[in-house]
Each structure stands twice: as C-alpha cells, then as structure tokens.
Image (cartoon, rainbow, N blue to C red):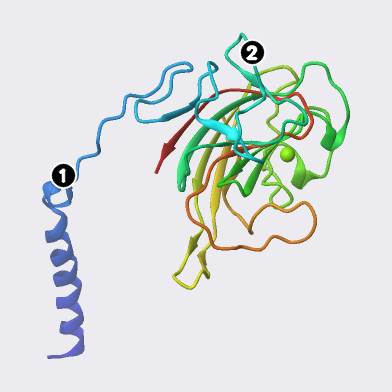
C-alpha cells in the first residue's frame, strides 16, 4: 500500500477506535468501593469519624510529655486550655501517622514580648515536626519561624494571623514520612496547613524533625503522639480533633 493511503487509513481508523472506547458513558463509571459515610461537623462539632482530642472538659487524651504524668495545664471555663509555663509540653496518649488535624488556638490578648517570645507555642506532628504557633500579628520575626511556618524550614505563603486574643484555626493535612526496612527514608513527610481558612503551607516537604539549632535530619520512626508546646507563653487551645487517613 502506498504511504499516502496508509496515512489516510490511520487518520480515520485511529480516532474511530479511540472514540469507540469512550462513547458509552457507563464505561468510565466506577462503583466499587463506595466511600463510607461521614457526617460533617457543624460549628465546633467534629466530623462523625474524628477522634476528639480535646473538647474543653478534660485532658483524658493527654499526658505531660516529659514524664507521662497528668497534664498540669489550666482548664478554663470557656472550654479551652492554657499552657502553664514551666509545666512542659503535652502529648496525646494515642499515636498517629497520616492525618487531618483541626486545632483552635488563641495567643494572649495582653501582648507581652516580641518576635519569638510573643504567643509562642507549637503543634508537633508525630512529636517531631512543628507547625509554629505564634502571635505574628504585627510582630516581625524570622519568616521561617512565624505563625504558619514549619519551624525553621518553610516560610508560610502569607501571614493569615488574627489579632492577639482572637481564636484562630489550623486545619492540617499531614502525610507521614516513609522509611524502608533498613530505616532509610523513602519519602519525606508532607504537610498542608490552612490557617483561618487561608492556605499557608501547600503540600510542603518536611526536611526532617524540627531543630532549633542546626539542620534537620530524618531518623526512622513509626506512629507517634501529637505534641503541643509549652514555650512559656499563655497560649490557649480548644476544639482539637483528628481524623486518621
Ligand atoms: Mg513554637
């Protein structure tokens, strides 16, 4: 066959063949598996499949991180808890890996200190990777240490802070790092952070555990508790829930 006719045939035959595959809309419908039903939260109510870590009434899901004793942070009448400076970090009794996390926090209404000493706390995913909590409302500090940063690693896309004394939200999507059987890193952790409805971290790669001095370096680990930081500031928390993914 002459090349011209070969091309002509192909020009008609190929599209028709491809088209034949997609003419039936049902051919591309996938029915199984069917996603299970989750009743969404409303207001401050968590989604139906979430683990409520803190609803303001008790610290049943938490322990002091330094010695696993009872939490000594203050429980408040407005269903919140406030860091007790010197009492130390607190962490969850349960361990988590990939998750969706909702946290509400409030930096002190009475502004004291500046830079890193104003409303500092932190949310440590798997006890290691800090999403910074700070009063970054008209309070300049190093950009990779302000609210919404992954501390000393990634600058938030924008500053979406509310003023001191006002409740704020973090909605965090977290993919834990993967390690192989030889404890070598095969995929770094990743995090998306939405602060007050504004994306501040989008699928950000975690470079390793948060370090104050020096460069982060991964070390293999499995599921681990969520940790909240005592940084000697009167930061309050309320309505904390988590969905394992
Ligand atoms: Mg901090």
Assign a secondary structure to mark 1. Answer: loop
- Specify few, some or many for label 2: CA neighbours under 10 Å numbering under 14, 14-19, or 20 or more: some
Q: How many marks?
A: 2
Horizontal and vertical percent position of residue 95:
48, 44
**How many angstroms separate mark 1 from mark 2 (CA)?**
48 Å
Question: In the displayed structure, does residue 242 sit left or right of residue 169?
Answer: left
Assign a secondary structure to mark 2. Answer: loop
* Residue displayed at 55% across by 31% down: 62
The residue under label 1 is 31
* Quarter of the figure with residue 119: top right
Horizontal and vertical percent position of residue 48:
35, 25
- Specify few, some or many for label 1: CA neighbours under 10 Å numbering under 14, 14-19, or 20 or more: few
Question: In the displayed structure, does residue 182 sit left or right of residue 193?
Answer: left
Horizontal and vertical percent position of residue 76:
64, 13
The residue under label 2 is 76
Which residue in the rendered view is the most extreme toward the bottom?
A: 1
The quadrant where ligand 1 appears is: top right
Check the image and report above or below for 132 versus 213: above
Q: Nearer the viewer, mark 1 or mark 2?
A: 2
Check the image and report above or below for 56 versus 12: above
Establish whether ligand 1 lies closer than 8 Å to the Cβ of label 2: no
122 and 8: which is toward the camera: 122
In the rendered image, the quadrant that contains the C terminus is top left
188 and 181: which is toward the camera: 181
């Amino acid at each position: 066959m002459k090349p011209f006719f070969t091309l002509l045939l192909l020009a008609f035959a190929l599209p028709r063949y491809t088209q034949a595959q997609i003419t039936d809309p049902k051919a591309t419908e996938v029915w199984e598996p069917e996603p299970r039903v989750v009743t969404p939260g409303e207001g401050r109510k968590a989604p139906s499949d979430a683990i409520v870590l803190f609803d303001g009434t008790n610290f049943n899901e938490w322990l002091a991180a330094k010695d696993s004793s009872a939490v000594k942070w203050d429980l408040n009448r407005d269903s919140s808890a406030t860091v007790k400076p010197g009492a130390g970090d607190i962490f969850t009794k349960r361990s988590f890996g990939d998750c969706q996390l909702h946290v509400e926090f409030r930096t002190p209404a009475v502004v004291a200190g500046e830079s890193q000493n104003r409303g500092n706390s932190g949310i440590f995913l798997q006890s290691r990777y800090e999403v910074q909590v700070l009063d970054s409302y008209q309070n300049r500090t190093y950009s990779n240490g302000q609210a919404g940063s992954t501390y000393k690693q990634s600058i938030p896309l924008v500053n979406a802070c509310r003023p001191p004394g006002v409740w704020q939200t973090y909605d965090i999507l977290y993919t834990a790092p993967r390690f192989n059987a030889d404890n070598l890193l095969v995929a770094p952790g990743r995090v998306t952070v939405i602060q007050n409805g504004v994306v501040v971290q989008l699928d950000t790669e975690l470079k390793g555990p948060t370090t104050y001095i020096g460069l982060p370096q991964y070390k293999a680990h499995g599921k681990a508790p969520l940790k909240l930081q005592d940084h000697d500031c009167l930061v309050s928390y309320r309505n904390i829930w988590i969905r394992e993914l």
